[in-house]
Image (cartoon, helix red, strand yellow):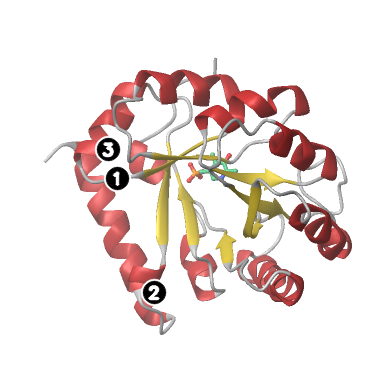
Amino acid sequence: MTAVAERLSAIDAAIADAARRAGRDPAEITRIVVTKFHPAALVSELYGLGVREVGENRQQELSAKAEALAELDDLRWHFIGQAQTNKAGAIRRAAQAVHSVDRLRIAEALDRAATDDLLLDVLLQINLTDDPGRGGVAPTELERLAEQVLALPTLRLRGVMAVAPLDEDPAAAFARVHESAQRLRAVAPGAEWISAGMTGDFAEAIAAGATHLRIGSAITGPRPAQG
Ligand SMILES: *Cc1c(COP(=O)(O)O)cnc(C)c1O
């Protein structure tokens, strides 16, 4: 077994464990492997190990890897980084899901960028910090943004996404995400995804109802120096 294969299976076992401890079925949890800063060859290796959901946080890297691996046509690319309006077309061409919709302008740009009949899965990123400069919509603005996104015909609103702040207990942060997810479902009943949990806090996220985990370094190994 390669090191990546070993880490992948160890993480999957830990996910299954955390799910059982939370009284949940591991099968209802999707593990997205975040491959940022790693080469397309690593994504290929992960594909060979059965991985079909991968995440990237920068548009250029997403586009390059999705193009390099276009023949793996059941690979699903999740965009999880801050999205710029002028990159919306490129993001939409490369990704099947965008987790980081946090304002109407980016939602509209993604909607306008549609070139076929396929709907784009989108999640509303919630800012769990008091710093408005961080990505994400303020929790109090969530329903309003949801209603605006629901009016955009080529987007399918799937749920919420959040990153736990470094200075807060992740269980407390994810409890707030869960509460936001419930408020979202009141206006968008089909929007059931909760994208939360990374290498350091996925067990807490699972306990708080996460449906999509975004796990990078625990599977890929340490990230190469940022370019
Ligand atoms: C990098 C990243 C992750 C994965 O982080 P790890 O700690 O390596 O698991 C998850 N979510 C977002 C938004 C990221 O940018």
Q: Earlier in the sequence, mark 3 or mark 1?
A: 3
> Could you tell me how far apart the alpha carbons at marks 1 and 2 are, in whole angstroms?
19 Å
Secondary element under disc 1, as helix, strand or loop, is loop
Q: Earlier in the sequence, mark 3 or mark 2?
A: 2
Tell me which residue sits at (53%, 57%) in the image: 197
Establish if 127 lies above or below 4: below
Q: Which mark is residue 51?
A: 1
Q: Is residue 47 toward the left or the right of residue 220 in the image?
A: left
Residue type at mark 1: give it: Val
Q: Which residue is mark 2?
A: 19
Q: Nearer the viewer, residue 91 or 132?
A: 91
Residue most toward the top?
227
Total numbered labels placed on residues in the image: 3
Residue type at mark 3: give it: Leu
Disc 3: residue Cβ within 8 A of ligand 1's nearest atom: no
Q: Which residue is mark 3?
A: 46
Q: Nearer the viewer, residue 93 or 130?
A: 93
Confirm or deny contact between disc 3 and disc 1 (CB under 8 A): yes
Within 10 Å of disc 3 (Cα), the crowding (few <14, some 14-19, many 20+) is: many
